[in-house]
Image: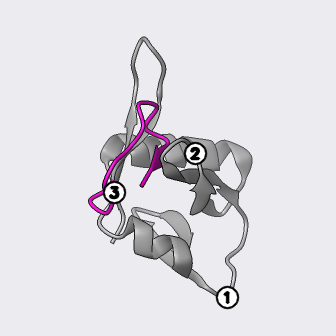
Amino acid sequence: MIKLTDNALNAVRGVISTSGASGLRITVESGGCAGFKYIMGLANETTSDDKVIERDGVKLFVDNDSHKYLAGTTIDFVLAQEGSGFTFDNPNANAGCSCGKSFS
């Protein structure tokens, strides 16, 4: 299961409400400085191989290939002077990079 903290949930809910999207798609792709990278974007529909995770009315769409890398991950949204954004606490990652957007 992928978990959203309350901060992440509120951030996603705010973006979805202003965009009219149905939910948030999270994908893992090859790339980044550590081997794999997280991709996030708004989505309007599911695909046939999506797992749909819903919490308090917010839907996450995750394809089956990405889900195996993300199972157990907690996604947070952090407000900081250096920059705000989503963070991933991924128990499947052996290593990460300093930007927090890629892992191996």
Name the one closer to the observer, 73 or 100.
100
- On screen, residue 67 versus residue 37, left or right, reads left
Where does the magenta region start and end? 90-104
Q: Amino acid at mark 3?
A: Ala
State the mark number for residue 93. 3
- Helix, strand or loop at label 1? It is loop
Residue displayed at 44% across by 13% down: 82
- On screen, residue 95 versus residue 67, left or right, reads left
In the rendered image, the residue lying farthest to the top is 81
- Counting residues from the start of the chain, the first of labels 2 and 1 encountered is 2
- Helix, strand or loop at label 3? It is loop
Render colour scheme: one colour
**Image x and y of residue 16, in percent:** 62, 50
**Image x and y of residue 43, in percent:** 69, 62
SS assignment for the magenta stretch, majority: loop
- On screen, residue 17 versus residue 1, left or right, reads right
The CA distance from mark 2 to mark 1 is: 27 Å
The CA distance from mark 3 to mark 1 is: 27 Å
Residue identifier under label 2? 32
Residue displayed at 43% across by 43% down: 10
- Helix, strand or loop at label 2? It is loop
Q: Amino acid at mark 1?
A: Ser
Q: Determine if residue 57 is in view.
A: yes
The CA distance from mark 2 to mark 3 is: 13 Å
**Image x and y of residue 67, in percent:** 46, 73
- Counting residues from the start of the chain, the first of labels 2 and 3 encountered is 2
Residue identifier under label 1? 48
Name the one closer to the observer, 9 or 75.
75
Relative vertical location of residue 73 with respect to residue 52 in this rendering, above or below? above
Q: Amino acid at mark 2?
A: Gly
State the mark number for residue 21. none
